Each structure stands twice: as C-alpha cells, then as structure tokens.
Image: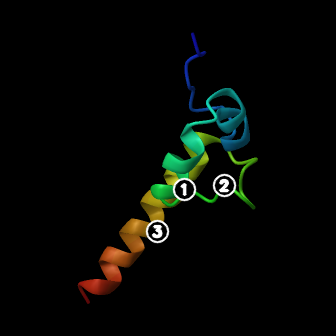
Amino acid sequence: MYPSIKAEMTLKEIMETHPKLEDKLRTYGFDICCAKMETLAAACERKIFQFQRSFRNSTQ
C-alpha cells in the first residue's frame, strides 16, 4: 500500500512514492522538471494564480 499524498510533499517526493503519477502531473500542467522541489500546495497555488490571471486577461 502506498503512503498518502500530503500537500506539504514535494512533487519529487510524490513521483518517487507514486511513480505512475508522473504522467498525470505532467498532463495537468505541473512543472515536474524544474519545479519538482516545489510542494504540492505551492504548485497548486501557482496553477490557480496562472488560471485566474489568464481568465482575467481573456475577459478584458
């Protein structure tokens, strides 16, 4: 049984613990190359910020 994924885990830790998730992280647009030391929580916050900025720019 795999350990649970926690928000404070780095993307690298998640990929090492759950190797099959690497493709899923990439599919959802997470930077698994340069930002793999970023925590899951920080990566999600950055993705939300990018989405909000893109959405705001598309409605102006």
Using the image as rendered, state which of residue 28 and residue 1 is in the foreground: 1
Of circles 1 and 3, which is in front?
1
Q: Do the CB atoms of the residues marked 2 and 3 lie less than 8 Å apart?
A: no
Image location (x, y in percent) of residue 43:
58, 51
Which label is found at residue 26?
Answer: 1
* Three-letter code, disc 3: Gln
Q: Do the CB atoms of the residues marked 2 and 1 lie less than 8 Å apart?
A: yes
Left or right of 52 in this view: 7: right
Q: Quadrant of the N terminus?
A: top right
Q: Mark 3: give few (<14), some (14-19) or many (20+) Cα within 10 Å.
A: few
Which residue lies at the image location 76% right of the left edge and 47% below the top edge? Answer: 37
Which residue lies at the image location 26% right of the left edge and 90% below the top edge? Answer: 60
Compute the Cα span from label 1 to label 3: 16 Å
Using the image as rendered, state which of residue 45 and residue 24 is in the foreground: 24
Q: Mark 1: give few (<14), some (14-19) or many (20+) Cα within 10 Å.
A: few
> In the rendered image, which residue does mark 2 sit on?
32
> In the rendered image, which residue does mark 3 sit on?
50
Compute the Cα span from label 2 to label 3: 16 Å
Query: Reading the chain from its start, which is encountered first: label 2 or label 1?
Result: 1
Query: Reading the chain from its start, which is encountered first: label 2 or label 3?
Result: 2
* Three-letter code, disc 1: Arg
Q: Secondary structure at mark 3?
A: helix
Which residue lies at the image location 23% right of the left edge and 84% below the top edge? Answer: 59
Q: Do the CB atoms of the residues marked 1 and 3 lie less than 8 Å apart?
A: no
